[in-house]
Image (cartoon, rainbow, N blue to C red):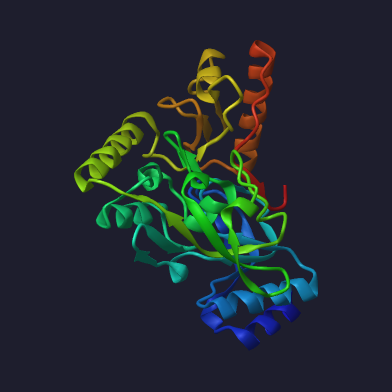
Amino acid sequence: MDTIIEQLKEVLEEDQILTEEPMRKHTTFRIGGPADIFVIPKTIEDVAKVCSIAGKEEIPLFVLGNGSNLLVADQGMDGIVLQIYKNFSGISADGNELTIKAGTLLSTAAKAALAEGLTGFEFAGGIPGTFGGAVVMNAGAYGGEIVQVLKEVTVLTQDGEVKTIPAKELELGYRTSNIIRNGYVVLSGTIALEKGDPNEIKAKMDEYSLARKTKQPLELPSAGSTFKRPEGYFAGKLIQDAGLRGYQVGGARVSDKHCGFVVNQEDATAADVMHLIEDVQRIVKEKFDVVLEPEVKRVGRF
């Protein structure tokens, strides 16, 4: 790794390069061992240079937002973690469209839509992630999904080209897209909304916010919904009906408040979470013959 670090120092400032950085500091689960190299770019040029070095040296590169929907291994992560977050935050409005930088929090983007009197993005206000991450996984809540409003995305390709791609070419589906498969790094995107009544928009956002506070375990670290919604079922209901409310492995626990969430109850490890997830999958399959697929992305040295 010393050679890689020397190359990075030639193109970035020293405070942009961290070594053996604990990933628990950068995930909403508050779980994860050290990343070999953790890089904080300030410009698109920085991103391109880091990607170029990783490609040339054939080492793993993982693009991180604010670390929601993520479980990092206790042993940490190989290669480079490239964080596109606060340095890549910003929104510009043009009529009924908002262009949003990849590191912008969805909550910030939803508030910007409200300020512009634009409706259609209320669902995103409480999703704990960045816009870039939301595009990659076609994030959604309360019947809304990114695919419903996304017009286009600007990405950095594997060849180092900055390219704008129409949303229809991203193969956006339920919690999926072709972005990672194609090796794209999301830089920004444009959403198209509709003019609405600010009072009605705020009322809907407040309704969703209250529902989250009432029904979800926001007081404990988690990665959001742990499992994808199985066709014809709700994951949380299946887990509850299987008698697993409050089921705990080590420091990881099925939330007492919402069984669709695994929470970090007591300094949980990634191994605790994985053991719990596997137990839940096995028991639900035995009782209901339904396979639960994790929504949380697992990365690192498992």
| Closest to the observer, 279 or 46 | 46
Residue 5 occupies which quadrant of the picture?
A: bottom right
The residue sitting at 55% across, 46% down in the picture is 138
* Direction from residue 200 to residue 146 in the image, left or right: right
* Direction from residue 213 to residue 5 in the image, left or right: right
Q: Position of residue 176 (x, y in %)?
A: 62, 44
The residue sitting at 66% across, 25% down in the picture is 281
* Direction from residue 107 to residue 196 in the image, left or right: left
Q: Position of residue 143 (x, y in %)?
A: 44, 34
Give the answer, above or below, for where 210 lies relative to 202.
Answer: above
Give the answer, above or below, for where 46 lies relative to 178.
Answer: below
Number of numbered labels in the structure image: 0
Q: Is residue 25 something one can see in this rendering?
A: no
Q: Position of residue 218 (x, y in %)?
A: 38, 39
Q: Is residue 92 something one can see in this rendering?
A: yes
Residue 44 occupies which quadrant of the picture?
A: bottom right
Identify the residue at the far left of this view.
199
Q: Quadrant of the N terminus?
A: bottom right
The residue sitting at 55% across, 84% down in the picture is 13
Residue 239 occupies which quadrant of the picture?
A: top right
The residue sitting at 41% across, 40% down in the picture is 220
Give the answer, above or below, for where 47 lies relative to 283.
Answer: below
* Direction from residue 25 to residue 55 in the image, left or right: right
Give the answer, above or below, for where 118 lies relative to 89.
Answer: above
| Closest to the observer, 76 or 12 | 12
